[in-house]
């Protein structure tokens, strides 16, 4: 007999297998000797009360043995397939679309403007240490996309998009720890993700797929409302029968190319704000009610949201035990983001704190046309750069000074390697953004007592939460309403917001392409 049993235990006992087995036996009302095997299937932390507890769900086999039902993903070698599915972008949407193509017997050809994960690291060092931004290889562009050098958070509310377990299982097959299959808020870590991404590349190539780096798409040819060719900067021409663009939220040149070719794109809402960095010990104390945290507890995180003037202000991409990193994609702009290593052992915690920016709101402020949101977004990024010293040093302010509208005479230590410069963010940000953010922070403090403190730095600007432009597509068939063989995909198309949702979207697009081919 197999039972599903939930228990709550203190961090003291999380690694005590005998204690857990005895507890499960007590819950099942059987002798411990009757329990032949157990399997942990879900793990979370309940920190709502003073005593922090682990919540665990087990499969318990009583006088029987649990079957090992791990199902490996099967790929069909597409080496000899003549019809190629061109995928522009090697981020999570592009790679998971390619892998799904191989499951379905289709041959994916992935084109990416950037470099593979290993070569990409040199350009990350350049932006961190020298302030040099390579427009094709940075924290946003290159193999694995923006998610590769981030926390690797694997959480989404998009359960209707598809089977999340399929995506998690594929990640495990390519080197992620089994823990991501059971944790309520799984993550991988930016030190582990590159190896997983490289393993995915190997799977795609070994099964007949193609991946081409340093291949920036700069032009396309259309006939009869179809894209028939893509032209890359290196002079190559790529014939297309079906093509998906999964180019990420920062590929502004692709939007401009589409407009030039009269392919419909749309202005959409997005979010913009700052990144706030606290000492991790302070966040631990707020969340766990005591400090230092128990050695068996992970670095504490938080997620908060408030309504200010009928607009959302919310935390975004919170990185416990993390680092703030420079995420500009062009010279002359400053953009910041967050990342964590797998151990989340940095002494700092950081999170984006952003507010939604609506289409109507932008139009009312004179940002008209499909590129209105993008112009607003890039304008703020350039304003931040103009307030810097000509490097990637980011404008910053102490949190209380930010809210009170005062200049900061000094700043707290920070994880941000290019360095911080004391600057009046309350003046640099657009007024309506600043007003909502400062009131949002005060509201956050009511939920996280101690959050509003001079121990925190506010760093500008967090502006790449999502794309300000959407590439429309049919809800059922996933293709563009005018360009019949174009399949917009992922964050850059406006249909995802993180690794998991992008991966699911990539798989859905591959399914749609397969269905369209079979119908003909």
Image (cartoon, grey):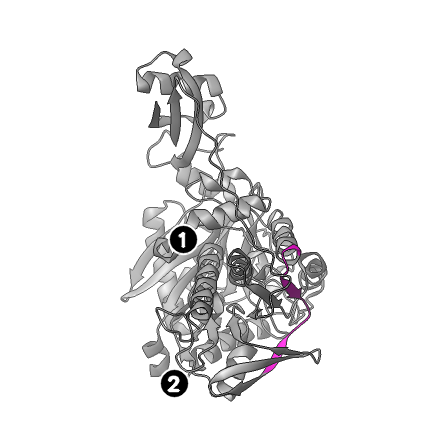
Q: Nearer the viewer, residue 450 or 46?
A: 46
Residue under numbered circle 1: 156
Q: Is residue 217 within the magenta segment?
A: yes
Q: Quadrant of residue 418?
A: bottom right
**Viewer-proximal residue among 245 and 270:** 245
Q: Is residue 443 visible?
A: yes
Q: Residues within 10 Å of mark 1 (few under 14, many from 20)?
A: some
Q: Residue furthest left?
A: 310
Q: How many marks?
A: 2
Q: Is residue 81 magenta?
A: no
Instruction: Tell which of 51 and 29 is nearer to you.
Output: 29
Which labelled disc corresponds to residue 366? 2
Query: Above or below — where is 334 with respect to 201?
Result: below
Q: Secondary structure at mark 1?
A: loop
Quadrant holding the C terminus? bottom left
Q: Earlier in the sequence, mark 2 or mark 1?
A: 1
Residue 318 vs residue 141: left or right? left
Image quadrant in which you'd find residue 40: top left
Q: Position of residue 443 (x, y in %)?
A: 32, 54
> Which residues lie in the magenta part?
206-219
Query: Quarter holding the N terminus?
Result: top left
Left or right, 373 with respect to 171, comes to left
């Amino acid at each position: 007999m197999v039972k599903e049993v939930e228990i709550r235990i203190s961090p003291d006992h999380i690694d005590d297998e005998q204690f857990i087995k005895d507890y499960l036996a007590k819950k099942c009302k059987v002798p411990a000797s009757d329990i032949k095997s157990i399997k942990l299937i879900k793990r979370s932390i309940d920190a709502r009360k003073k005593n922090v507890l682990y919540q665990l769900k087990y499969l318990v086999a009583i006088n029987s043995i649990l079957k090992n039902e791990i199902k490996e993903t099967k790929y069909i070698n597409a080496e000899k397939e003549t019809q190629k599915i061109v995928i522009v972008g090697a981020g999570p949407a592009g790679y998971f679309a390619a892998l799904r193509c191989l499951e379905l017997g289709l041959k994916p050809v992935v084109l990416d403007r950037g470099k593979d994960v290993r070569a990409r690291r040199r350009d990350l060092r350049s932006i961190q240490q020298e302030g040099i931004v390579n427009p094709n290889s940075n924290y946003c562009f290159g193999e694995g996309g923006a998610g590769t050098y981030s926390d690797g958070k694997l959480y989404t509310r998009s359960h209707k998009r598809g089977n999340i377990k399929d995506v998690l299982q594929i990640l495990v097959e390519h080197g992620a720890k089994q823990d991501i299959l059971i944790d309520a808020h799984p993550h991988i870590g930016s030190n582990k993700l590159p190896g997983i991404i490289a393993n995915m590349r190997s799977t795609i190539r070994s099964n007949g797929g193609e991946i081409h780096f340093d291949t920036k798409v700069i032009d396309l040819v259309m006939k009869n409302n179809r894209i028939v060719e893509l032209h890359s900067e290196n002079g190559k021409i790529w014939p297309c029968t079906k093509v998906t663009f999964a180019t990420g939220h920062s590929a502004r040149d692709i939007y401009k190319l589409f407009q030039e070719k009269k392919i419909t794109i749309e202005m959409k809402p997005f979010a913009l704000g700052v990144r706030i960095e606290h000492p991790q010990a302070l966040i631990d104390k707020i969340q766990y009610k005591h400090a230092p945290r128990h050695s068996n507890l992970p670095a504490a995180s938080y997620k908060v949201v408030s309504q200010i003037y009928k607009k959302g202000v919310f935390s975004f991409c919170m990185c416990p035990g993390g680092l703030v990193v420079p995420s500009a994609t062009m010279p002359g702009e400053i953009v910041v983001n967050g990342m964590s290593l797998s151990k989340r052992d940095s002494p700092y915690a950081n999170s984006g704190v952003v507010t939604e920016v609506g289409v109507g709101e932008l139009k009312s402020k004179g940002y008209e046309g499909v590129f209105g949101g993008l112009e607003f977004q890039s304008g703020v990024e350039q304003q931040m750069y103009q307030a810097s010293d000509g490097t990637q040093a980011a404008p910053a302010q102490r949190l209380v000074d930010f809210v009170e509208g005062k200049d900061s005479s000094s700043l707290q230590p920070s994880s941000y390697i290019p360095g911080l410069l004391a600057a009046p963010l309350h003046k640099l940000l657009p007024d309506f953004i600043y007003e909502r953010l400062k009131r949002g922070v005060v509201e956050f403090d009511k939920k996280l007592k101690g959050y509003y403190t001079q121990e925190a730095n506010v760093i500008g600007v967090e502006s790449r939460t999502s794309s300000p432009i959407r590439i429309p597509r049919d809800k059922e068939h996933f293709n563009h309403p005018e360009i019949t063989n174009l399949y917009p995909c992922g964050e850059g198309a406006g249909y995802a917001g993180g690794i998991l949702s992008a991966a699911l979207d990539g798989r859905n697009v591959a399914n749609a392409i397969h269905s369209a081919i079979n119908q003909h």
